[in-house]
Amino acid sequence: MSAAELLGQIADVGRDAWRGGYSRHVFDAPERELRTWFVERAQRLGLGVETDRNGNLWAWWGSPGPEAVVTGSHLDSVPGGGAFDGPLGVVSALEAVEALQAKEFRPAKPVAVVVFAEEEGGRFGLPCLGSRLMTGTVDADWARGLRDPDGVTFAEAIAAAGLDAGGVGADPDRLGLIGQFVELHVEQGRGLIDLGSPVAVGSTVIAHGRWRFSFSGQGNHAGATRLADRVDPMLPAAETVLAVRRLARGWDDARATVGRLVPTPGGTNVIASTVDLWLDARVPGVETPALVEEIAVAARDAAEGEGCELIISRESYSGDVVFDEPLRRALGEWLGAPPELPTGAGHDAAILAGFVPSAMLYVRNPTGISHAPDEFAEDADVAAGARALAEVLERLAK
Ligand code: GLV
Ligand code: MN
Ligand code: MN
Ligand code: MN
């Protein structure tokens, strides 16, 4: 079945009527439905499917073993996300395996299709949680204690999914099986529109991280409290949002975003007692923490001006990543020299790149929009991406 047809099969799973697009978060009902669907599709291809200790799914063509050629992506989404970010890499991998089987290719190395858990951090706040846990780049106890917006811990969620929460953590044996990892992904900006190409090879990923700013003040009555008597955490939060844009402009090619701001208790006629906001900051090179420190200074000033407390905590950070040069060169040769593209988006491939030769393929997105319902890829480009991935898997696994 083609990647586009496979996407069609899951087009109704996890639709978000309120936000638009899809909301599929790790181990919630839609994401579990997608897992079941994936297992069934993989088994139809004769692949042996297992779930690892961190909730990542592995579908093996051949027995699991060393020097494996691994591809795949994720099935979770951001809140109200598009149809392609994540699933495109999974369905393209399934099409590529089926195409290679149809031409009776016999891989000399194990081939695996992986679905990583919680790539977006949409539920527990830490992006690439499944690959970070596998590679041991996040502390297992800390991860177990991460809470979703309803207060459910990752340990509770993984146990509810039927896995052993005590087993969460670094998985060096599994990591040691991976010879190369290649992730196909929808392009998340305008790169391929501008270059006029359906497919690109990934070059770099910009350093990025998430910081939580918690402002606390005095919850109170919106009508009965004179302006002079207020300690309203919404004010320093709002000043911080403006400072983020103003200060990020001072750094070359920086991106800085406040996409989530939560007042508690959140009543129209209530002065909030706390406001939490999350800063997503990305600057090429090593400058992201310096930009965040500038923002922190502005936030502390604003908090002090209103008499509020402020606690800032870093939730994640990943440095610049350069994908494996020999693997990139090989992909370029095998695929007829497609363009190379840097990206500001994070990926499991960027986590794995610190441990095994890793590469990415991007498929053109004619809207240039991602993490939103308007994310798109034409069927012809999806087919070109799956063909490119099949070519790469065949070359690597022969
Ligand atoms: C993940 O998609 C990210 O880059 O935020
Ligand atoms: Mn994403
Ligand atoms: Mn993604
Ligand atoms: Mn991503």
Image (cartoon, rainbow, N blue to C red):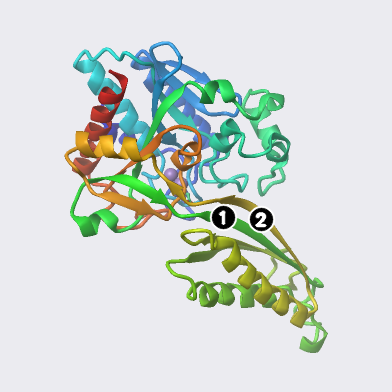
> In the rendered view, does 348 fall on the left or right side of 264?
left
Alpha-carbon neighbours of circle 1 within 10 Å: few (<14), some, or many (≥20)? many
Alpha-carbon neighbours of circle 2 within 10 Å: few (<14), some, or many (≥20)? some
Name which residue lies at 44% across and 50% down: 81
- Of the image marks 1 and 2, the number of the one nearer the N terminus: 1
* Residue in the foreground of this view, choosing between 216 and 103: 103
Instruction: Give percent across and percent down for residue 11.
Output: 36, 39
Cβ of mark 2 under 8 Å from ligand 1: the answer is: no
* Residue in the foreground of this view, choosing between 71 and 75: 71
Amino acid carrying label 2: it is Arg
Image quarter hosting the C terminus: top left
Query: Which quadrant holds residue 264?
Result: bottom right
Q: Name the residue under label 1.
A: 209
Tell me whether the residue at label 1 lies in contact with that at label 2, contact meaning CB atoms closer than 8 angstroms.
Answer: yes
Q: In this view, does 258 lie above or below 182?
A: below
Name which residue lies at 44% across and 28% down: 114
Name which residue lies at 30% across and 15% down: 107
Q: Name the residue under label 2.
A: 314
* Residue in the foreground of this view, choosing between 370 and 340: 340
Instruction: Give percent across and percent down for residue 152.
Output: 70, 41
Name which residue lies at 33% across and 35% down: 327
